[in-house]
Image (cartoon, grey):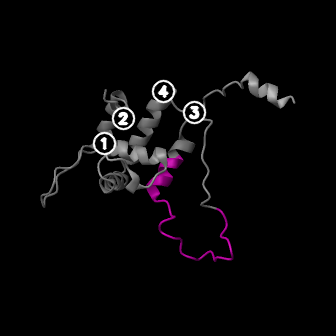
Amino acid sequence: MARDLRLITDEQWERIEPLLPEPKASPKGGPKPKPNRPCFEGILWVLRSGARWKDLPERYPSPSTCWRRLRDWEAQGVWLAAWRALLGELDAQQALDWEECFTDASFSPAKKGATQSERPNAERVQSGWWWQTARVFLWECPWRRPRRPKSRSSARRSTR
């Protein structure tokens, strides 16, 4: 039995799809552009897993195709609208755990006397789309989810 490995539902895609421009064939020829949905899901896979682009599973378009599509959407200003739509849909379904967060050491001081003017390693610098995506997730979404009650087992452990 084949398993559906989609990261978003058809209903979620219906809300996101109109926000993304249709890919156009190159005037120089070449292969037909890949559809938006597998590229979008490939981008989500990288965001969710934290993996490198080159580790993208074969069920998605090539890593360079997904990366270029993300770059183009960011340049056209449509990536954040699609990201907001997805987060809004997930929030409406109560599929997000707003108590989880992530930390990043990008603002840690330089070690071993490195100067502030030292140029950062290009491999370690996160691109603009990554920071904007994280900002929308962390600051623009409502934090109205109630806290989950602690289990009794944790209460027993804390009294000892």
Residue at position x 20%, y 49% in the image = 33
**What residue occupies the far right of the structure in this picture?**
160
Q: Which residue is mark 1?
A: 38
Q: Nearer the viewer, residue 114 or 17?
A: 114
Residue range highlighted in magenta: 108-135
- SS at mark 4 in the image: helix
Q: Which residue is mark 4?
A: 92
Look at the picture and state if 77 lies above or below 118.
Answer: above
> What is the spatial separation of the Cα atoms under label 1 and label 4, in whole angstroms?
23 Å
Confirm or deny contact between disc 1 and disc 2 (CB under 8 A): no
Main secondary-structure element of the magenta-colored stretch = loop
Confirm or deny contact between disc 3 and disc 2 (CB under 8 A): no
Q: Of the residues shown, which amino acid type is indicated by label 1?
A: Pro
The quarter in which the C terminus is drawn is: top right
Residue at position x 62%, y 58% in the image = 105
* Residue 102, numbered label: none
The verdict on residue 120 being magenta is yes
Res 106 quadrant in image: bottom right
> What is the spatial separation of the Cα atoms under label 3 and label 2, in whole angstroms?
21 Å
Q: Which residue is mark 2?
A: 5
Question: Of circles 3 and 4, which is in front?
Answer: 3
Confirm or deny contact between disc 2 and disc 4 (CB under 8 A): no
